[in-house]
Amino acid sequence: MIGCGDLPVERVLGIRWDPNADVFCFTVRKQTEGRKYTNLTKRDVLKLVMSLLDPLGFISNYTIQAKMLMQDVWRSGVGWNDEPVGEYVQKWSAWTSQLPALEAITIPRPYSKQMRERVNIQLHVFCDASEQAYASVAYLRVQTNNSVDISFVMGKARMAPLKPISIPRLELMAAVMGTRMAACIGKEHEVTIDEVVFWTDSRTVLFWIRSDARNYKQFVSHRVGEILETTEV
Amino acid sequence: MQVMTFGATCSPTTAQFVKNKNAEEFRRDYPKAYTAITEKHYVCDYLDSASTEAIATQRIRDVVEVHKQGGFKIRTWASNSSTVLSSIPKELRVVTDN
């Protein structure tokens, strides 16, 4: 009989899983640990940003900051083998200084310990956008007769395109991303989700969804069409 | 062909096909293991969850058995349940540090 607490942290499909505590965790790559994060070229910066494997978006709020920086650097026209200068250096070191803190993050694997006594399961998807990026995140709400457990399922954050587009349109893109995420979660889970609730803070998007999609330009009508087709809103 | 060619363009497909084909042949005797092998395997990793330890233990036993019939040894098992883990032969378990 082997006791709990002596199992090594395993890599499961690239994600670190600690079977003893039953949590997911992160390890910052060794080769980057000893290296200085300063005097890096654009190529090195991208390499470090992309080395963080995070398919479920546990830390997308953090990685998106580096991607924003990457976009700024790109906009400034710095070459692949050139070192970014000026304000970028400061922003970059601010970002990398938080890297070691990732190792302290743990995400529980089970959604709920009371999964077997569930009476109702809801999926809540939140969508939001800003000038720089848009994101959506999904939480599972497991209700039993005397308790409610809320747990993180997945998140996704994307950069706004280089060409500026209006905030309502970005909010709409976030909403589309949210509906795709919900569809993906529903398909990949064996447990039946009784209800899916979508949240957005954009009244424009809500209005678009409620009105006749054909009245709008292709950009809006196609996205509204997809939302209406894949969800029951 | 007795040996898997390593690094050929078709190797991943061939490996997947053989893995699924083997499971297919034991589908009648091990239906649960068949679904586990065809749907819960990701290339060379197997990732599954079960509602009780008994179900997990049985499924692991079946999956190991089916793979064994095809000449495959599935190893480095890890579980958050020590009961489940202790049902797996020691040499197939994940290597502990101490």
Image: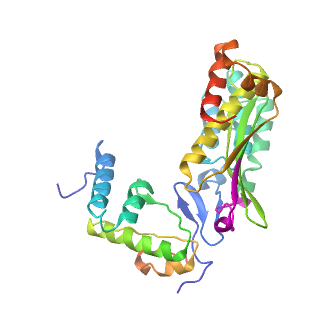
* Nearer-the-camera pick, B95 or B26: B26
* Residue B57 in the figure: left or right of residue A205: left
**Magenta residues?**
A103-123
Numbered circles on residues, count: 0
Question: Magenta includes A51?
Answer: no
Quadrant assignment, res B22: bottom left
Q: Residue at x 67, y 34 (%)?
A: A158
* Residue A214 in the figure: left or right of residue B67: right
Q: Position of residue A103 (x, y in %)?
A: 70, 59
Q: Position of residue A152 (x, y in %)?
A: 71, 53
Identify the residue at the far bottom of this view. Answer: A1
* Nearer-the-camera pick, A57 or A81: A57
Q: Residue at x 59, y 69 (%)?
A: A19
Please indicate, yes or no, whether residue B84 appears anywhere in the rendered image: yes
Question: Magenta includes A115?
Answer: yes
Q: Position of residue B91 (x, y in %)?
A: 41, 78
In this rendering, is residue B50 above or below A227?
below
Colour theme: rainbow
Please indicate, yes or no, whether residue A70 appears anywhere in the rendered image: no
* Nearer-the-camera pick, A188 or A26: A188
Q: Residue at x 57, y 75 (%)?
A: B81
The quadrant of the rendering that contains the C terminus of chain A is top right
* Nearer-the-camera pick, B43 or A187: A187
Q: Position of residue B89 (x, y in %)?
A: 41, 80
Q: Residue at x 37, y 71 (%)?
A: B62
Identify the residue at the far left of this view. Answer: B1
